[in-house]
Image (cartoon, grey):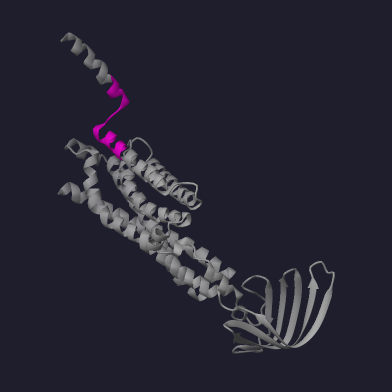
Amino acid sequence: MLFHSSVRKEMARSFGATVVVLATIVMTMLLIRTLNLAQRGSVNPTEVVVVLGYTVLGHAPTILTLSLFIAIVGTLSRMYRDSEMVIWFSSGRGLASFVWPLVRFVWPVLVMIAALALFGWPWAHQQSQKLKDRFESRSDMERVAPGQFQESAGGHRVFFIDKDSVSGKSAGEVFIAANERGVQTVTSARAGRVETINGDQFLLLANGQQLESANDQSSIKISDFDEYGVLINEKAREIERATPPRVLSTQALLAGRTPAYLGELSWRIGLALAAVNFVLIGLVVSSSNPRVGRNINLFFSLFTFIVYYNLVNLGSSRIAAGTYDFWRFMILLHGGVFILALLALMKLHWNWTLRSTLRRRPAAGPAQEAR
């Protein structure tokens, strides 16, 4: 049918162009953030592209939802502005008649958004977290760049190794400055090597000297040693204990049912439900007066998108904190938005106004009295 095909074709062109533009903008922003993490030592510089790919995949549901919303609003607003909607309305098509061609166009995108939100989102965060944890759990000796001062994983020690004395797991002219448990220590040694003892990695220093002093400078102790061991992989154990809910699968969240898990679950399901609601919202907010500025609808639509997503994020944090019920929030927010959008669509379809409703009631009174 001409009506269905014309709407879907123009929607597809607008959606494709919007996805390309938004994806480029998001990738640029995420690239800057990833490079900043690499500069601070949170991400391996050689894995920046991989981390960027996983991060973009995690944000794909939001990109697709916003692209779909902008495509619907932009296409229908142009049809209003060019009086195409007047032609369709004159031929007997109401605003609700656009629901079916929209559904035929958006259902594959909605399925993709739901799959990415429920399965792609946790998988992408899990893979990205593995890369970060692997980089963070490397030993302090691996962090050291010869000829440069380098901070340890816990931030309590500073290492320095002579750049001309590194060979495999051994090094010469080692310098370590530490501040732990209220004691400042400065250790220097002529040689050092890495060994594994009972599953832990130690840096064994040989032929060195250590200066210990309290933070209040009340005492100073100087000692010489032939061999001294320093633990260099304590960060790995700390990482293993912490598992954020966003890296867990949806099945694990359903099985756990703790407030933190339900908060993450509300976010993932909310991404899919919000995409459905934005189809109806886009159909409603695209109705405009051609005399009004052409960008008013787009600005209002973006404002609606930001408010809705902020409410989803706020509800997720409130549920995770245990101050709000999961089902009550899902029904009130997503169910309420769906009902309001459906009522607004019916109002525009049947052209309901308060003035017309008030006019009908008095007009029926005299007729009934005349009978």
In the foreground, 317 or 73: 317
In the image, taking residue 281 as reference, residue 258 lies left or right, namely: right
Q: Position of residue 144 (x, y in %)?
A: 62, 79
> Which picture quadrant has residue 220?
bottom right
Q: Residue furthest top?
A: 370
In the foreground, 176 or 253: 253
Q: Position of residue 293 (x, y in %)?
A: 38, 39
> Which picture quadrant has residue 139?
bottom right
Q: Position of residue 76 (x, y in %)?
A: 29, 44
Q: Position of residue 233 (x, y in %)?
A: 60, 77
Residue 74, visible in the rendered structure: no
71 w.r.t. 54: above or below: above
Q: Residue furthest right?
A: 218
39 w.r.t. 267: above or below: below
In the foreground, 5 or 159: 159
Query: In the rendered view of the protein, which quadrant contains the C terminus?
Result: top left
170 w.r.t. 34: above or below: below
> At x 70% / y 86%, what residue is drawn?
205
Within the magenta stretch, is there residue 357?
yes
Per the rendered image, the range of residues in magenta is 342-358
In the foreground, 327 or 105: 327
> At x 22% / y 52%, what residue is drawn?
104
In the image, taking residue 363 as reference, residue 326 lies left or right, namely: right
Q: Disc count in the image?
A: 0
> At x 59% / y 84%, what residue is drawn?
198
> At x 33% / y 45%, what residue is drawn?
282
Most prominent secondary structure in the magenta stretch? Answer: helix
Within the magenta stretch, is there residue 292?
no
Residue 37, visible in the rendered structure: yes
